[in-house]
Image (tube, rainbow, N blue to C red):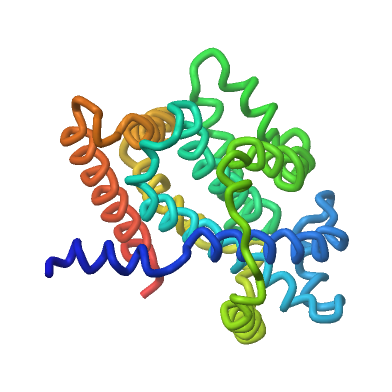
């Protein structure tokens, strides 16, 4: 039996969609708890205060952080596992499902920004730089999504707790309403998540680091490394859009299915290479 066959059997033996929804619920519930204590006017101070002053603050912040990461990872695996079933969906429904992935990424990314630490501050500056590199509408998009330099993290906070959540619900609603999960079947998964969050506190860098190079969120390491070699518009906008377009267009019936598949595999390989390069080339010795 080939490796691909084993991989396919493994992917289909686990209900990734259920794990994805469980992780989403944990992220939302813990987000409500820590969001009540968070102040976007003083992001780093309020984030640190959650750990220091709020009862079980480190646990709830870790639960929100790690369950959100798990939500994204299980969503990606779930998408791969149900890929062959996407042909059953209407064209626009398939597009909506593909678009949920960048929306989830933006939810994760804005969460990093809201920490207000060195990683978040640097990532915010890079995001604004990429937005402003877009011809004609770059300034408008930056004002709409970030505008950190002018307005702090107010707009980022609003998008994190409202805009992107509603957009995700809209895009995934037709798919989500098909699911009926029973949380009682996943007590072990929930317990393991809680145990992990008690042991491993979510990261929080110093507010300012006296280093030349700061790595961003793990899922944007490849993009961050690519920014060192090409124009921000190409690295931050065109490259991700080409990947999303290929994932949207690829179906078993597509006339250029083999070409799309090769492009996606090459894109993922190059992004992994760039991510590893960013991780190891600039890590402290």
**61 or 255, nearer to the observer:** 255
Q: Give left or right: position of 98 versus 176.
A: left
Query: Residue 110, relative to residue 235: is it above or below?
Result: below
| Residue 113: percent from left, percent from top | 65, 51
Give above or below for 154 relative to 140: below
Query: Residue 97: percent from the left, percent from the top?
Result: 49, 39
Q: Nearer the viewer, residue 210 or 196?
A: 196
Viewed as shown, does residue 223 lie left or right of 256? right
Counting from the top left corner in percent of width and height, residue 243 is at 35, 36
Q: Residue at x 64, y 48 (%)?
A: 110
Quadrant where the N terminus is found in the figure: bottom left
Q: Quadrant of residue 280?
A: bottom left
Looking at the image, which is closer to me, 68 or 42? 68
Q: Is residue 153 left or right of residue 247?
A: right
Residue at 45% across / 50% down in the picture? 220
Relative height, residue 137 to residue 219 (above, below): above
Q: Position of residue 59 (x, y in %)?
A: 72, 78
Front residue (pair 227, 107): 107
Quarter of the image where one finds residue 125: top right
């Amino acid at each position: 039996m080939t490796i691909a066959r084993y991989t396919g059997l493994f992917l289909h033996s686990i209900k990734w969609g259920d794990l994805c929804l469980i992780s989403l619920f944990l992220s939302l519930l813990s987000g409500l708890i820590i969001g009540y204590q968070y102040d976007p006017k003083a992001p780093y101070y309020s984030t640190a205060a959650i750990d220091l002053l709020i009862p079980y603050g480190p646990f709830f912040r870790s639960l929100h952080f790690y369950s959100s990461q798990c939500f994204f990872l299980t969503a990606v695996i779930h998408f791969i596992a149900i890929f062959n079933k996407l042909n059953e969906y209407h064209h626009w429904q398939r597009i909506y499902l593909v678009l949920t992935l960048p929306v989830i990424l933006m939810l994760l990314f804005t969460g990093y920004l809201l920490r207000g630490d060195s990683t978040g501050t640097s990532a915010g500056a890079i995001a604004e730089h990429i937005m402003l590199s877009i011809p004609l509408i770059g300034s408008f998009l930056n004002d709409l999504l970030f505008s950190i330099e002018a307005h702090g993290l107010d707009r980022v906070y609003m998008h994190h707790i409202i805009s992107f959540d509603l957009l995700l619900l809209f895009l995934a609603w037709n798919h989500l309403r098909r699911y009926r999960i029973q949380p009682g079947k996943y007590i072990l998964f929930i317990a393991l998540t809680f145990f992990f969050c008690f042991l491993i506190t979510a990261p929080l860098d110093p507010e300012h680091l006296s280093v030349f190079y700061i790595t961003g969120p793990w899922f944007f390491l490849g993009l961050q490394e690519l920014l060192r070699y090409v124009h921000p518009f190409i690295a931050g906008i065109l490259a991700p859009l080409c990947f999303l377009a290929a994932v949207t267009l690829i179906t078993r019936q597509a006339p250029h299915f083999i070409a799309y598949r090769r492009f996606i595999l090459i894109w993922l390989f190059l992004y992994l290479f760039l991510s590893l390069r960013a991780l190891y080339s600039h890590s402290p010795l």
